[in-house]
Every structure is written in structure tokens, then in C-alpha cells.
Image: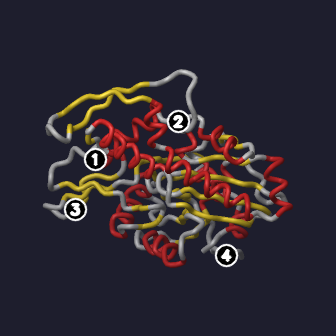
Amino acid sequence: MGLFSTAPDVAVSLGTVNTSIYMQGAIALSEPSIVAFNTARGNIEAVGSEAREMLGRAPTNITPVRPMKHGVIADFDAVEKMLAHFVHKVRRRTFPRAHLLIGVPTASTAVERRAVKDSASRIKASEVCLVDEPMAAAIGAGLPVTEATGNMIIDVGGGTTDIAVVSLAGIVYGRSLRVAGGEMDDAIVQHVKRAHNLLIGESTAEKIKAEIGSAEPLEKPLRMQIKGRHLSEGLPRTVIVTDAEIREALSEPIKAIVKGVLEALERVPPELSADIYDRGVVLTGGVALLRKFDKHLTKQTGVRVVLAERPLDSVVLGAGHLLCNRELLDRISVA
């Protein structure tokens, strides 16, 4: 009968920054993992993209929050409401009770995994099963996870960096680092504050990272005009930042990720290590799109690192693949 009485029909990538949903053969939704509460009326004002627009712009009675921190639930009530909103948004009213498949970080504890299942159950999901996110990412990136060969995946998202070596439909080595895109954004905020005496918000830092951020020097230098509040004068000001200074700001979180990758390579069994050196490492996640990040990892580790075809969607695509592969799902499901 397998582990689950009914095959899941909705796959969810519940991320710190974005939540994606896969159903009926396609990605049906991809929105920010943000909930905006109206504290005056005690209800939810907005969820997802609408809530993201309120970051740094909302009045005092509206509080946008990210209910996921480092890939795990930080606000149970907000996650339940967010999940319910997203699932209801993509499903027809004639199918009110969803069978959910949800990805979780490799290093999440039993308590954290139980929290994810409980939150999904409370939105009246009829059945919930969990899979490790790096395994789902490896499947979504097209790696032969069921073969007796070593496949290494680095999934750098908004809240965690998941590093895993997969073989025979199992994770031989897995580790989650709580250093990822969010820490990079914080580093940019702090740099602009120190270097330019300017206070910027999370959205501006994320935009800087996307437009001029890089892990290695660029052939053509980039510059960007940014706006914020001058700390001494208290007035709006505009400054110019360069790719070189943003690269310096990102150096510490990038070093932490490189260190985690090197430690993983040192702990892999020799046979699988040889496979990894032959086949290379696959890089996924939103931060994988940082300019020359793959080349920087290759340079620092001595192992070829390649970018997945769809790095932003690898986890949800892999989870979606499992919806129609019940045999593989039974083998790799963690709960």
C-alpha cells in the first residue's frame, strides 16, 4: 500500500522568502512568504505579493511578517493562514481537501517537521507527507538520484543553504547552513550604513544584490543609484554603489557557504567523492543566480560547479515530479 493511503496532488516548496505550489503538471503559484497583519482589527490584511508591497511602507497598524525563518516555522498562526490562502487560491472549490507534499530542510529537527505537518493538517489537508528539500532539488535539477553514483547538490535559498550528497534515492551526507540570501541582504544593509551613512530597507538590499551583486570581479563594472534615509541628517538621500563594494559586503556570507561546501566534500565517502569530481556539483536556489557564484565555488573547491537549468524552481519541480512517481516518493519520504 505504500506509506500514504492517497497520492498527494499538491506539492509545496515552503521557503523563507518564497512559497511555490505545483499541481496538475505545472507550477501554479510562486509568491513571497509574507503575511501582513492588521493589528487594529486583528485580521490579515494581505498575503504573498500584496503583503510584500507593504514592506517598509505600511502604516503602524499593519505589520508584514515573514513566518518562516531559516527554512523552519517561526510563526505558526501566520504559516497556517498563508498556506490556507495559497492552497485555496490554486485549487477548485470542488476539491476542498488537499493531499500535500511539502519540502523541508535536511537539518530540520523532528519537532520542526512535526510543526510543518501540524500546520498543514490544521488547514484541513487530508494527508501530508514531507521530503528533504535537497532531494527534491536534485530531482528537479534532473540528477539520477536512484543510481548508485554520488550526486552533490547545493541549494542556496533565502533562509538556508542545503548541501547534500545523494545516492540510491537517499541522502548520504546532508547539512543545512543558516547562511543564505537573507544574510547577504543584511550584509548589504550594514555596508551601506557604514560606508554611506545611509539606511536602506530589505527590498532595496535585495534589489542591489540582484542587479549588481557578484562573487567574482566582473568584466564590465556595474554601478547603481540607491535611495534611503541619511542617518545624520534624517532626510532622504541618493548615493551610488558599485559592484566592487557590494562584492566586498557579500564576502563573509559567501565565505561561510564555501566553508560548508569544503567540509561536505571532506566527509563524503571516497567512492562517491570520485563520482562528484567526475560529474561535478549542481547549484540551485535563488542565490545561485548571483553573478559568477558558480565560478567562485569552482575556483574555491576545485570541483566543477554548474548552474541548474531552473535554479529558482528546482525544489518545487522535483516535488511536483514525485506527485506522479509514487514508488520513488515512498522511498524518499521522511514523514
Left or right, residue 190 beside residue 306: left
Q: Gap in Å between the C-alphas at discs 1 and 2?
A: 25 Å
**Residue 3 circle label:** 4
- Which residue is tagged 1? 55
Q: Nearer the viewer, residue 90 or 305?
A: 305
Instruction: Judge whether residue 91 can be spotted in this image.
Output: yes
Could you tell me how many numbered marks the image carries? 4
Residue at screen point 46% across, 69% down? 120
- Which residue is tagged 3? 43
For the N terminus, the quadrant is bottom right
Q: Earlier in the sequence, mark 3 or mark 4?
A: 4
- Which residue is tagged 2? 214
Residue 6 locus on image (x, y percent): 62, 70
Q: Nearer the viewer, mark 1 or mark 4?
A: 1
Q: Earlier in the sequence, mark 1 or mark 4?
A: 4
Q: Quadrant of residue 69?
A: bottom left
Residue 151 locus on image (x, y percent): 76, 55
Left or right, residue 257 beside residue 76: right
**Identity, as a three-letter code, of the amino acid under mark 4:** Leu
**Identity, as a three-letter code, of the amino acid under mark 2:** Ser
Instruction: Judge whether residue 101 can be spotted in this image.
Output: no
Structural crowding at the residue carrying mark 4, measured as other residues with C-alpha within 10 Å and reported as few (<14), some (14–19) or many (≥20): some
